[in-house]
Structures are given as structure tokens and as C-alpha cells.
Image (cartoon, rainbow, N blue to C red):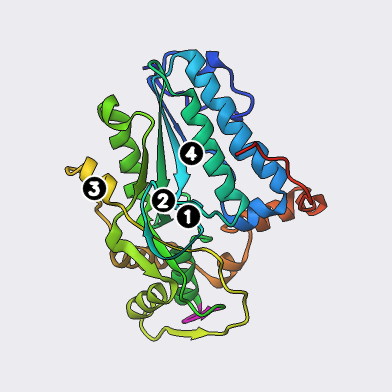
Amino acid sequence: MPEADESLIADISTLTPRDLEGYDAVIHLAGLSNDPLCEVDPGLTWRVNHEGSMHLARCAKEAGVQRFLFSSSCSIYGRAGDKVLAEGDELHPVTAYGETKIVSERELSELAGDSFSPVYLRNATAYGSSPRLRLDLVLNNLMAWGYTTGDIHIMSDGTPWRPLVHCRDIARAFVHLMTAPREVVHDQVFNVGTTEENYQVRDLAEIVREIIPGCTVSYTGEGSPDSRDYRVDFSKFKNTFPDFEFKHTVRSGARDLARDYERFGMTLDLLNGPKFGRLRALLQNFAFERLQPAKEVAKPAS
């Protein structure tokens, strides 16, 4: 495998097979995430998340890349009711982001063959400290509000369920599946996380309150109920890779976040500013304010 060129910056939609020659695997993480960002222009979301993904996959296959790891998401389960969902259960996405992940998984499967092995990692909701901190993630956001203000306002009733997984465990899972035997992972979907780490939003808020002394939690009820509400079964990953250990929990990750917010000086101005808000930064620095959500979005046939 050639040495990675850290100076190479390219768009997934403009890469060519030649750019990928000599590589054994592609880990595809690029795309528009965060539901508010994706809903600004659903047409753009489809072009980036679906068309860009398929262009990259076709280039990889033509270049002889053997394994293609696709970063999907548990958010494709959408509304699950009381059922804890496994990989083969019905999908009910409620956002453009989730829809693009489903369609991309299906079309990547059509490319699978003897010389091209796609794998689909449906990651739970990420959290945790990292050099590229995201504050739109539920636990990171709750911890930031609790740390900077001493008060957490939940704009709903806090009942929706979410599975959570540390960003470092996601990274380790990708490395593990990149090197796993082909017959174990070929054209397979894996929920990435642990079944024990399914939480209601109100549970997460209580964990934050426990970790930040004096922090209070209130439920305002002013927001619309969150239509995303799902619990996920991660037994397939656990049973397939019994030697893999998830090293972080929500509680340990929340403590790490509190430590790092203190260490690096998280403030309310930073929390409210564009540095950690991608949508705010785009609206401030680019022409996204001219984009209107499309009335009709052309989608591939299901």
C-alpha cells in the first residue's frame, strides 16, 4: 500500500480510479452529516452523500481496491417504537441524511463481487473528545451547555431513545473490519456499538447533571417532539467479533469531555459561535442562505 499523501485534498465526486490505484481498502467517511445541515438543501445532500459515495465506490472498484468500508448510521432506523432493532429489521428514516445512507448501502451491495468487498458500518450516535470536536452531537452538546451555563434545557420531554458509541471506538471498529477475514465481512451490515449503551435523552441529561456539580436539568416542552426514536441491537457485531472490546462508556466519555472542556477553555461564546457549529459557519461564510429546501428531490428508485 502506498504511503498516504497528507497534502492531497480532493472531493469524492472528482476522484478518479488512478487516485486510488495501489490501495487495499477505502474507508469512506466523507459526506454531509447533521440533520439540520442536510435539510438546508436536500438536493445537495443527495448529490454529496449518495452520488458522491457511488462515484467513489465505482472508482475504487475500477482501481482494484479490494475492500470498501462505508460509514452508515443507526439513524436510518428512524422511528422504531418499542422494538430493539437489528440489521435485518425494517427501516424508517425520517431525514434526508438517513435516506441517503439506505440507498447507498443498497447500491454498494450491487457492486459487490469477487474483486470488490463492501462492508456497511451502521454507527450509533457518536460522542467524545477529539481534535475535531463536534458539538452538534447530543452528549457533547449537553455536556457543553452544562459546563458553560450550569443548566441544561431539554426542549422536548427527553423520552426519545438513542444508541451511543465513542468516536474512538468507531475508529477502532473500522480498523478491525478493514483487516477481518473477507468471508466474515463481505457485503455485510454491522450495527456498531453495544446494546447496553442505548439511552433516552433524559438519561443522558441526568448523567451530565451527576458529573457537573450544581448543574440543573429542565424540560421546557417548547420544541417539537423528536421523530427519531430508536433502540438498536448490537449482538451481530459482538458475536462476530468476540475479541473486540468497546473501551468507552457514556459515563467515562462524559467525564473526559468535562476534563477537556476545562483544559481547553470551553466558553458559552465558543458554544454559540461558528467555530463548533458547522451550519452556522456555512451560513456565515458561504452562500447557503440563498439555498432553499427543494420542493421535489430526485431520488433513486428503491
Label 2 or label 3, whichever lies nearer to me, is: 2
- Tell me, for residue 113, which label it has, or none: none
Q: Nearer the viewer, mark 1 or mark 2?
A: 2
- Separation of residues labelled 1 and 3 (CA atoms): 19 Å
Q: Which residue, given by chain and number where applicable, does mark 3 sit on?
A: 238
Q: Main secondary structure of the magenta part?
A: strand
Give yes or no for contact between labels 1 and 3 (Cβ–Cβ under 8 Å).
no
Q: Are marks 1 and 2 in contact (CB under 8 Å)?
A: yes
Q: Secondary structure at mark 2?
A: loop
* Marks 4 and 3 in Cβ contact (< 8 Å): no
Query: In the structure shown, which secondary structural element does the residue marked by tag 1 occupy?
Result: helix
The answer for how far apart the CA atoms under marks 2 and 4 are is 24 Å
Marks 1 and 2 sit apart, C-alpha to C-alpha, by 9 Å
Sequence-wise, the earlier of marks 2 and 4 is 4
Q: Nearer the viewer, residue 80 or 195?
A: 80
Dot 3 alpha-carbon crowd within 10 angstroms: few under 14, some 14 to 19, many 20 or more = some
Q: Which residues are magenta?
A: 149-154
Q: Earlier in the sequence, mark 1 or mark 2?
A: 1
Q: Nearer the viewer, mark 1 or mark 3?
A: 1
Looking at the picture, tell me which residue is in the foreground, 93 or 220.
93
| Residue corresponding to mark 2 | 89
Residue marked by disc 1: 77
Dot 4 corresponds to which residue?
A: 29
